[in-house]
Amino acid sequence: MSLHKYIFVFCFLLLTSIIVSAQNNNQVIRSKTVWNDDKGSHINAHGGGVLFHQGRYYWYGEHRLPKGDAPSGGVSCYSSADLCNWVNEGIVLATTNEAGHDLERGCIIERPKVIFNPITGQFVMWFHLELKGQGYAAARAGVAVSDSPTGNFQFLRSGRINAGVYPANMTQEERAFIFDNDKYKEWWTAEWYRAIDKGLFVKRDLESGQMSRDMTLYVDEDGKAYHIYSSEDNLTLHIAELTDDYLHHTGNYIRLFPGGHNEAPAIFKKEDTYWMIASGCTGWQPNEARLFSSPTMWGPWTQHANPCIGTDAAITFGGQSTFALPVEGANQLVIFMADVWNPDNLIDSRYVWLPVEFQSDGTPTIAWSEQWSPLDFVVQPEPLFSLFEE
Ligand code: DGJ
C-alpha cells in the first residue's frame, strides 16, 4: 500500500473512532427524555439526590418496579464522571422477604439521599419509609450505612423523629396550650388552620415522634448535617439537626411555614444565603415551585416568587423538586433536579435537570431549556480535571 493510502486509512479509522466515541459519550442533558444508563435502560432513580465523592458523582434514587408489582424495589445507585453518562451500580439498599421487617417487600421507599461522614468514613443514607400495607400512615425516616458509595447499605432502623422533644421555635405559650381536640375534627377550617399554626399536630405526635415524609439532607460547610422533611401530615416542613455521625437526630429542630403544605424540599447555599426550593402538595401532579431563603439554617426563612421561568414555569416544567446539586469545578453551577412523575408507570417517570441562574440581587431562577451541557460551566483549564476526571 502506498503512503497516501496508509494515511487515508489511518484518518478514516481515526474519524470513525471519534464519531463512535462521541455517540457513546453524551455531553448534554435533555430534560424529560429517556435517559439511558450504560446498559441501555432508562435510569431508575426517582426522587433522588447526588453525592460527589473523590471525583465521581453518585446518583441515588427510588428503584421503582413495574405496575402491579411491589411499590418499591429499594434504592438504586448510578455513577458518573461527567453528570451525563451514568453507570448502573445496581440496587444498594434492597427490600427483604422477611415478614415484619421495616423494609419488607411491599413497603414504600421514597426520596433517598446519601451523605459522606468524614469522621466515621461512612456513607449515610436517609430515606422516607412507609411500612408494608399501611399506605402513607407510618410517615417514618429510615437510615442505612455503607463503607462504599456503591453499597451495599446496611439498614439500621426507621422511625418518627425527635420523640418527646418540642421544636426550638415553638413558644412556651404554644407548648403549654391544651387543645380541645373535638373542635378540630373538621379539617381546613380557619380555626383548624390557627390550631395547626400553634402546633396541634406537633402535640398530637409529641410522644411517638414527628412525622417525616418527603425529605432531603444538607451538609453545611462546618460539617453539620440537617434532615429537612415534610411533617405534620405534610402541612409543615421541619429542619432537624443530625448528630456528628449523621445517624441520629440531636433533638434540635424547627418548624417552617406551619400549614404551608410544602413537599419535596431541595436546599443549597450561595454565598451567605441558604435557598430552599419546594413544591406544593398535589400528589403526583406537578404544581408551582416555591422558593425560600434564610441567612441561617435556623431562619428566619422568607418566601419568594416562583423561581421557574419559561414554558410550563407555573407547573415546574411538569416536574417536582428533589435535589439541588452544587457542581464542583464548574463556575458556580447549581443543578436543580426534579422528577416528572408518571403515576401509571413510575419506572417511566422522567427527569428535569436545569442550571440555576442567579439574578443581580442574588435571587435564583431556573429557566426551561431543551438541552444544555455542564461543560458550558467548566472553568478552564484546571477544574476541568476535577469535574471530568475518570
Ligand atoms: C408527593 C410526593 O412528593 C412523592 O414523593 C410521593 O410521596 C407522592 N406524593 C405520592 O402521592
Image: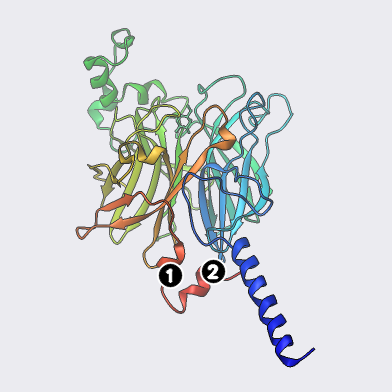
Residue farthest toward the left in the current orientation of the protein: 361
Horizontal relation, residue 45 to residue 233: left or right: right
* Residue 16, percent from left and from top: 66, 71
Quadrant, the N terminus = bottom right
Residue furthest to the right = 1
**Mark 1 Cα shell of 10 Å, populated few (<14), some (14-19), many (≥20):** many
The answer to which of 372 and 324 lies nearer the viewer is 372
Q: Residue at x 44, y 58 (%)?
A: 223
Dot 1 lies on which element?
Answer: loop
* Residue 381 image offset from top left, x and y in percent: 45, 79
Residue on which the image places disc 1:
378
Q: Is residue 235 above or below residue 93?
A: above
Res. 285 in view: yes
Residue type marked 1: Val
First reached walking from the N terminus: tag 1 or tag 2: 1
Mark 1 within 8 Å of ligand 1, using the beta carbon: no
The dot on residue 388 is 2
Q: Are marks 1 and 2 in contact (CB under 8 Å)?
A: yes
Q: Nearer the viewer, residue 150 or 384?
A: 384
**Residue beneath the point at 26% across and 25% down:** 198
Which x, y percent locates residue 85? 58, 58
Q: Nearer the viewer, residue 348 or 261?
A: 348
Residue situated in front as seen by the camera: 369 or 84:
369
The amino acid type found where label 2 is placed reads Phe
> Which residue: 24% across, 53% down?
363
Question: Where is residue 368 shown, x and y percent of the image?
Answer: 36, 49
Residue 252 seen in this snapshot: no
